[in-house]
Amino acid sequence: MSNYRYTLGDRTWRFSGLAEVMAKATPARSGDRLAGVIAETAEERVVAQMVLAELPLKTFLEDLLIPYEADEITRLIVDSHDTQAFAPIAHLTVGDFRNWLLSDDTTAEVIAAVRPGITPEMAAAVAKIMRNQDLILVARKCRVITAFRSTIGKPGHLSTRLQPNHPTDDPTGIAASILDGLLYGNGDAVIGINPATDNVAQSIRLMQMLDEVIHKYDIPTQSCVLTHVTNTREAIEAGAPVDLVFQSIGGTEATNTSFGFGLNDLAETRDAALALERGTVGNNVMYFETGQGSSLSAGAHHGLDQQTCEARAYGVARHFDPLLVNTVVGFIGPEYLYDGKEIIRAGLEDHFCGKLLGVPMGCDVCYTNHAEADQNDMDTLLTLLGVAGVNFVMGIPGSDDIMLNYQTTSFHDALYARRALDLAPAPEFGDWLSRAGIFTDGADYRLAETLPKAFARSLDQLPEGAEHG
């Protein structure tokens, strides 16, 4: 279909193609305004949503947003599409698909069966015509469970990434943050460091440090140094103790080229990590991070709206069977998500699309200090994502990443979410917290009143002033 239109009475709205319908149907956000693809009025947005709702899902298999020959992610999406899984929903329009997803008859098992037939563009399209409550309700049905040394994503559980970043990669400062996080019950998704100095030698040093901590205290979790995928491959070749392979990914080949990698790099490094066989309860070895606006900021969005580009990134993630995928929702800045309202909507969209596609979604509930947002907005998004069944969130000392300079969720925020929503840590990690004396030995996972002796000794060994400010 080359022309999209809608007529009401004597007035007709015309859209140049599917990409324009998708962009103008998207709830307003500053990134699409910056790209010049946003609906000019609320009326035009509603019309675009009505046009989108009437489109058959098959349209997305016939009218490709980025040409097959021009983009390896398009080729991945098309070549991996499962027509047999798609068959039960092949007759639906986007609007029908929304109703089908919301139906009580459409259970988690039913969604899982059709998942291989849902393309990222289909997921993005249906998200555009859904309210926040729709995104939450459907995402809650879509459980995606993964495992390495801990099991992430089970119903009734909420995990955290313990993020002990330090502006100079100081080992004592990192160790203090790790200890702080563990004592608050954080770290069951991963203990993951963004290195301030991103090279192979420094990455290996940090990997060794994390490996020593995990094995010293027999912690059922995994480590990750968030260095470039090619650095991780070199680290593996050098004999480093690599648990998870990290890479930031985007939804177009040009975006990932700007990040310095292609799909072959991910495949080769994943194979190398799998060969290490370091997992104990599973073998999901990849950790991806994404964020709405990354393709636009790289000048690689092909005229698409940022939410559609983001959903295509989940098509990449799905292919590599990751342990964790994290949308760093407010990190790029207000040029892409202007305020708390836009950040909240984007976080719910990302979580919904990822879970619908079978991706183990977490969210860095965050904002930069020049955005029109504050910690109350983050409390709202954290709570909504907890209700929606998010797999994991971030845990950072005092909500303030002193290396990356942005605001996110703290160690005690995870305690709030678990307590308010009756959620537990990953099963293996929860058992360890009780054995270690960090939590009371009970179903409610309350903090112990006294510091465990083993960790008290570790705290005593820190130099004066080493505790994270």
Image (tube, rainbow, N blue to C red):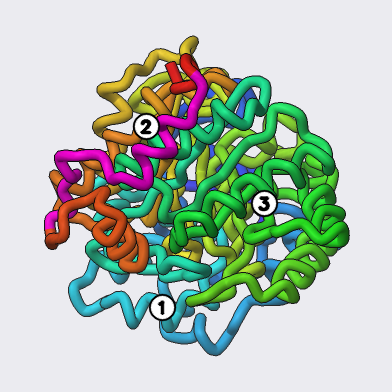
Q: Give coordinates of residue 82: x percent, y percent.
A: 60, 82
The foreground one among 209 and 310 is 209
Q: Residue at x 26, y 48 (%)?
A: 438
- Disc 3 crowd rating (10 Å Cα; few below 14, some 14-19, many 20+) is many
Q: Is residue 395 visible?
A: no
Amino acid, disc 2: Thr
Q: Give coordinates of residue 362: x percent, y percent.
A: 44, 50
**How far apart are the alpha carbons under marks 2 and 1?**
30 Å
User: Is 71 placed above or below 147 here?
Assistant: above
The residues colored magenta run: 444-463
- For residue 246, the mark is 3
Q: Quadrant of the N terminus?
A: bottom right
Q: Horizontally, is 268 left or right of 116 in the view?
A: right
Return the residue at label 1: 112
Q: Quadrant of the C terminus?
A: top left
- Label 2 sits on a secondary structure element that is loop
**How far apart are the alpha carbons under marks 3 and 2?**
21 Å
